[in-house]
Image (tube, rainbow, N blue to C red):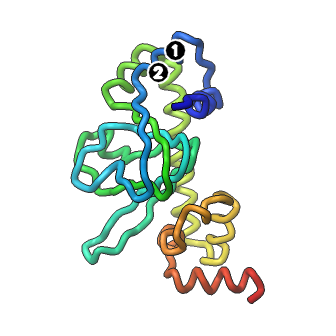
Amino acid sequence: MDTSGIFAQFERHITLDEKEKLSIRSVLIPARLKQGEFVETVGKVTSNFIFVNLGCLMTYYTDAEGTDHVIQFAMAGWWTGDLHSFTKEEPSIYSTRALSDSEVFYLPKTDMEALLQKFPKLERYFRILFQNSIVSHQHRLIQNLSVTADQRYENFSKRYPSLEQYVPLKYIASYLGITPEFLSKIRRKRSGH
């Protein structure tokens, strides 16, 4: 599987030499996923950090009534995974599955720890990645508390311009914290119908 995408992401924040790239390549586990296939499931410890090479993944929480609440989408070029489960080695409360046929690279926790020890610049890369993730989640929380549903949808469409081709509207509505019917109403209004 082509690793140019993952190295392009690394190169956004750090510069890797060929030895470092070879070491990283040696521990990545490539996988092809079919639409609907799970990469993480509730109750199991997350043992891999996941890089989306192609396609789209969705992470969600299922409540006691069986309703799915979308936590995040991960498109090509993004990392994903239940960080709490991954770092604390506790069972995950989330499920993550492919919304389209996808390609991912798994980075096993033990190999990631070894890489971080061996190449301190990777610590910098993942620190920046995690900081950006926290900022993004805080921004989403503030939006959900203080911005209208119409504005949340507009912001979502700007941030994820191609996501609607992969994602059923019910999952976008869940991510935005609204019903699918209300999202349909917003979309009709925006299209002038």
Residue, disc 1:
20
Relative to 51, say whether 10 is above or below.
Answer: above
Identify which amino acid the numbered label 1 is placed on.
Answer: Glu
* Residue 24 circle label: 2
Q: Residues within 10 Å of mark 2 (few under 14, many from 20)?
A: some
Q: What residue do we see at 46% from left, 16% from top?
A: 23
Q: What residue do we see at 44% from left, 42% from top?
A: 32
Q: What kind of element bears circle 2?
A: helix
Q: Quick check: 107 left or right of 142?
A: left
The spot of residue 94 in percent (x, y) is 33, 56
Residue 60, located in which quarter of the rendered image? bottom left
92 and 88: which one is in front? 92
* Contact between labelled residues 2 and 1, with CB atoms less than 8 Å apart: yes
The spot of residue 8 in percent (x, y) is 63, 30
Q: What residue do we see at 30% from left, 45% from top?
A: 85
Relative to 92, say whether 116 is above or below.
Answer: above
Identify which amino acid the numbered label 2 is placed on.
Answer: Ile
Q: Quick check: 12 left or right of 175?
A: right
Q: What kind of element bears circle 1?
A: helix
The spot of residue 117 in percent (x, y) is 39, 17
Q: What residue do we see at 44% from left, 57% from top?
A: 35
Relative to 168, say whether 188 is above or below.
Answer: below
How far apart are the alpha carbons under marks 1 and 2? 6 Å
